[in-house]
Amino acid sequence: MLDHVSLGCRDLSKSTAFFAAVFAPLGYRVHKSDEQETAIGPSEHWAFFLYPASQPAAALVGDRMHVAFRADSRALVVAAFEAARTAGAQAVPDREPAERPQFGADYFGGVFRDLDGHLIEVLTRGA
């Protein structure tokens, strides 16, 4: 079982604001944020971390790598996706929130690219 995930970013304050908006519908909040890191998660669990890139030209995005976050409902998937779009997310062709029966009869999710190009998915396996 995973405990937490971290991603590098070019502008920590912009990425913090972006993910704070995206994750608000999921009940996540910023637990800690300073010039070295940001910790975000539900309740008191620090589940998602952002770190500034170690070098200006450092590679941040891995080929075919993505991070998926579970929502409690389809409405929350759509809300998080819309918050991401409003905050500047890049669209991923054919990955708007929708049923994805190839992943399971109850699978509903969408994928976007964050401000640095990381693929982020929000999904639910509920109604």
Image (tube, helix red, strand yellow):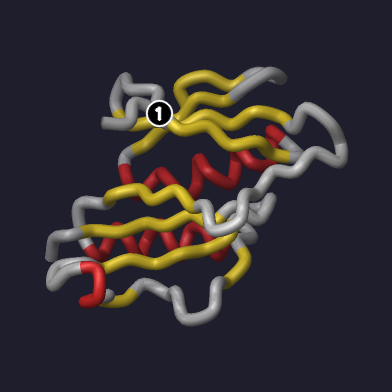
Residue plotted at (50% across, 47% down): 21
Question: What x and y, as percent, mark residue 49?
Answer: 52, 29
Question: What x and y, as percent, mark residue 33?
Answer: 59, 22
Q: Is residue 39 left or right of residue 73?
A: right
Question: What x and y, as percent, mark residue 106?
Answer: 14, 68
Q: Is residue 85 left or right of residue 24?
A: right
Residue positioned most to the front: 63
Residue positioned most to the right: 56
Quadrant (top left/top right/bottom left/bottom right) for the N terminus: top left
Residue plotted at (32% across, 40% down): 27
Which sits in the foreground, 59 or 51? 59
At label 1, which amino acid type do we have?
A: His
Residue plotted at (52% across, 52% down): 65
Q: Is residue 106 above or below residue 98?
A: above
* Residue under label 1: 4
Q: Quadrant of residue 54?
A: top right
Q: Exactly how many numbered labels are in the figure?
A: 1
Residue plotted at (54% across, 58% down): 64
Q: Is residue 110 above or below residue 114?
A: below
Quadrant (top left/top right/bottom left/bottom right) for the C terminus: bottom left
Badge 1 crowding class, 10 Å Cα cut-off, few under 14, some 14 to 19, many 20 or more, is few
Question: What x and y, as percent, mark residue 112?
Answer: 52, 63
